[in-house]
């Protein structure tokens, strides 16, 4: 099951059923809730995916910290666990003209308070048939 939300001209997922937990994994992002508390989160894992894939699932990112991070997503799961997805020291903010453009970055860090959030983020990203996300989202919105 896929549930999507339309915010402005952006649409992104808010919940998804994954094969790893066989249950509904609901979440909100900073695009829906600007009060997600990410204080104290730290590296829990990594994921290899495209910037476009992250935007399609989680909406537009924050612009990062202006120093080591160029893009960051904040995710609040239904049970209160929090995750962040961000690049680290490989973009224009940290490396200047030698840094990668956002659409060139594939190595993303997953932050949180425990490893469970890294597995959840990976499960969302590994949902089958990612090339059909636009069709699944459109169907969920209709």
Image (cartoon, rainbow, N blue to C red):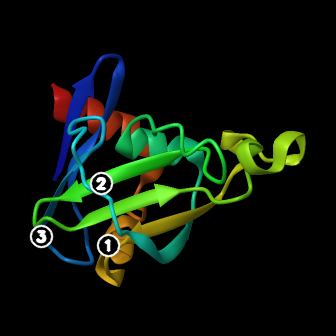
Mark in the foreground, 3 or 2: 2
Q: Position of residue 25 (x, y in %)?
A: 17, 62
C-beta proximity under 8 Å, tags 2 and 1? yes
Locate residue 109: give its quadrant.
bottom right
Q: Residue at x 46, y 38 (%)?
A: 62
Q: Position of residue 1 (x, y in %)?
A: 16, 53
Q: Is residue 81 left or right of residue 79?
A: right
C-alpha separation, residue under disc 2 versus residue under disc 1? 9 Å
Q: Position of residue 55 (x, y in %)?
A: 46, 40
C-alpha separation, residue under disc 3 versus residue under disc 2? 18 Å
Locate residue 113: give its quadrant.
bottom left
Q: Nearer the viewer, residue 98 or 15?
A: 98
- Give the quadrant of the C terminus: top left
Q: Is residue 97 left or right of residue 133?
A: right
Q: Nearer the viewer, residue 24 or 36?
A: 36
C-beta proximity under 8 Å, tags 3 and 2? no
Q: Position of residue 97 (x, y in %)?
A: 88, 39
Instruction: Name the residue that disc number 3 marks.
Output: 23
Q: Which mark is residue 117?
A: 1
Crowding at dot 2, Cα within 10 Å, few <14 / some 14-19 / many 20+, comes out as: many
Instruction: Name the residue that disc number 2 marks.
Output: 75
Residue most extreme to the top:
8
Per the image, label 1 sits on a secondary structure element best described as helix
Q: Is residue 15 left or right of residue 103?
A: left
Considering only order in the chain, which callout, 1 or 2, is on the residue closer to the N terminus? 2
**With respect to residue 136, does 117 lie above or below?**
below
Q: Residue at x 27, y 24 (%)?
A: 7
Q: Is residue 141 left or right of residue 137?
A: left
Crowding at dot 1, Cα within 10 Å, few <14 / some 14-19 / many 20+, comes out as: many
Residue most extreme to the right:
98
């Amino acid at each position: 099951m896929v549930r999507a939300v339309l915010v402005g001209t952006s649409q992104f997922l808010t919940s998804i059923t994954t094969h790893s937990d066989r249950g509904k994994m609901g979440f909100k992002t900073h695009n829906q809730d600007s009060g997600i508390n990410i204080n104290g989160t730290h590296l829990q894992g990594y994921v290899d995916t495209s910037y476009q894939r992250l935007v399609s699932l989680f909406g537009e990112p924050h612009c990062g910290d202006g120093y080591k991070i160029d893009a960051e997503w904040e995710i609040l799961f239904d049970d209160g666990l929090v995750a962040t997805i961000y690049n680290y020291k490989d973009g224009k903010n940290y490396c200047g003209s030698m840094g990668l453009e956002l659409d060139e970055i594939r190595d993303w860090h997953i932050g949180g308070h425990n490893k469970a959030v890294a597995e959840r983020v990976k499960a969302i990203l590994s949902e089958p048939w990612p090339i059909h996300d636009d069709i699944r989202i459109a169907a969920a919105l209709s």
